[in-house]
Amino acid sequence: MRVVIVRNYDDVSRKAASIIAGEITSKPNAVLGLATGSTPLGTYKELVRMHRQEGLDFSRVRTFNLDEYYGLAPDHSQSYHRFMEENLFGRVNIKKGNVHIPDGLTKDVTAFCRQYEEMIRQSGGIDIQLLGIGRDGHLGFNEPGSSLGSRTRLKTLTEETVKDNARFFSKASEVPRLAITMGVGTILDARKLLLIASGGVKAEAVKASIEGPVTSQVTASALQLHPHVICVVDEPASRLLLKKDYYKYVEKIAETVEAEARI
Ligand code: PGA
C-alpha cells in the first residue's frame, strides 16, 4: 500500500485526478469505478479541467459507480445519478451508454445486483476504483459489520451515515435509510484502488483503515488485503498515522528513483 500525504484538499484532488488521467491515457477504454460524496468533488473538477484544457478523452471510458440511494429516482436532486451528471458526466465527452450507476428504483433488487456484478465482469473488470471513506471507515455504503467478501446488495445505513448525509437534504427525515452498494468483495476485485481522504474528521477512520487490524467493523481496513492500493490523504487526515514519517520517506525515495530513471 502506498500512502501519499499531501498538504491539503486541493493537492489530494490534483493527485487523484492525475492518477486517474494516467490510467485513461495508458488505456483509453479504461473501466473506472467512481464514488460520490464531498471528497471526490475536487478530483472531478480537475478531471473536467484536464478534459477541457488538455484534451483528456473520455469517449471510450466506461464507468461503474459504487452506490445509489434506494428509493431515489435518477432525477432526484440528491441522487447519485444527478451528482455524477452535474459534476462529471455532463461536463466531459463520456458516452451515456458507457455509464453505470445502481438503479435506486429497481423492483427486483436481488436480480439487479446480480446483473450489476455481471456487467462489471463483462466489461473486463474495474481498472481503478476511486474511494472516499466514511467517518466510520465505510467504503461505498459498506457499513461496519459488512462482510469483507460481500457483493453488490441492499444495505441499511447507520445513524451516523444518515446524519453525515443529512447536510445535502432539506430535512434529516428525507435521507434514505437504504442504499444499493457494491460489496467489499466487489471493490477488492478492482485492479487498483485509490482512496482519498481530507480533513481531521477522517483522521480516525484513516488510521484504523491503514494501520488498524483488518476487520469488518472498519470496512476500509480491507484495503490491506489488496495488492495495489494508493491512499492520498492530506495532513489533517493523516494526523493519527503512526508511520507517517516512513510513508513520506518512501515517497521521497520513489521520486528520487523516478528522477534517476529519467536521466
Ligand atoms: P464524504 O463521504 O466524501 O462526503 O466525506 C465519504 C464517504 O462516506 O464515503
Image: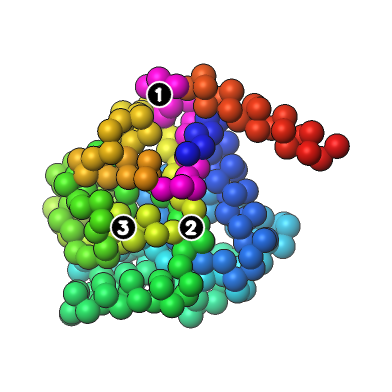
Q: Residue at x 33, y 73 (%)?
A: 116
- Do tag 1 and tag 2 residues touch (Cβ < 8 Å)? no
Give residue 185's mark.
3
State the scheme by which the image is colored.
Answer: rainbow
Dot 1 amino acid type: Leu
Rendered image: mark on residue 41: none
Taking depth in this image into account, of 26 and 224 the one nearest to the observer is: 224
- Marked residue nearer the N-terminal end (3 or 1): 3
Element type at mark 2: loop
Is the residue marked by circle 2 packed among few (<14), some (14-19), or many (20+) residues within 10 Å?
some
* Res 241 label: 1
Q: Tag 1: Cα neighbours inside 10 Å, few (<14), some, or many (≥20)?
A: some
- Say which element carries label 1: loop
Q: Nearer the viewer, mark 3 or mark 1?
A: 3
Q: Residues within 10 Å of mark 3 (few under 14, many from 20)?
A: some
Identify which residue is drawn at 47% across, 22% down: 244
Q: Position of residue 129 (x, y in %)?
A: 45, 56
Q: Give the spatial CA distance, label 3 vs label 1.
A: 26 Å
Specify whether 13 is left or right of 56: left
Kind of residue sitting beneath label 2: Arg
Q: Secondary structure at mark 3?
A: helix
Q: Nearer the viewer, residue 243 or 180?
A: 243
Specify which label sits upstream in the sequence, 1 or 2.
2
In screen coordinates, is 249 left or right of 234? right
Residue 156 image position (x, y, % from top left): 15, 56
In the picture, the disc for residue 191 is 2
Instruction: Determine the residue positioned at 32% across, 45% down.
Output: 222
**Magenta residues?**
226-243
Question: Is residue 209 one of those drawn in magenta?
Answer: no
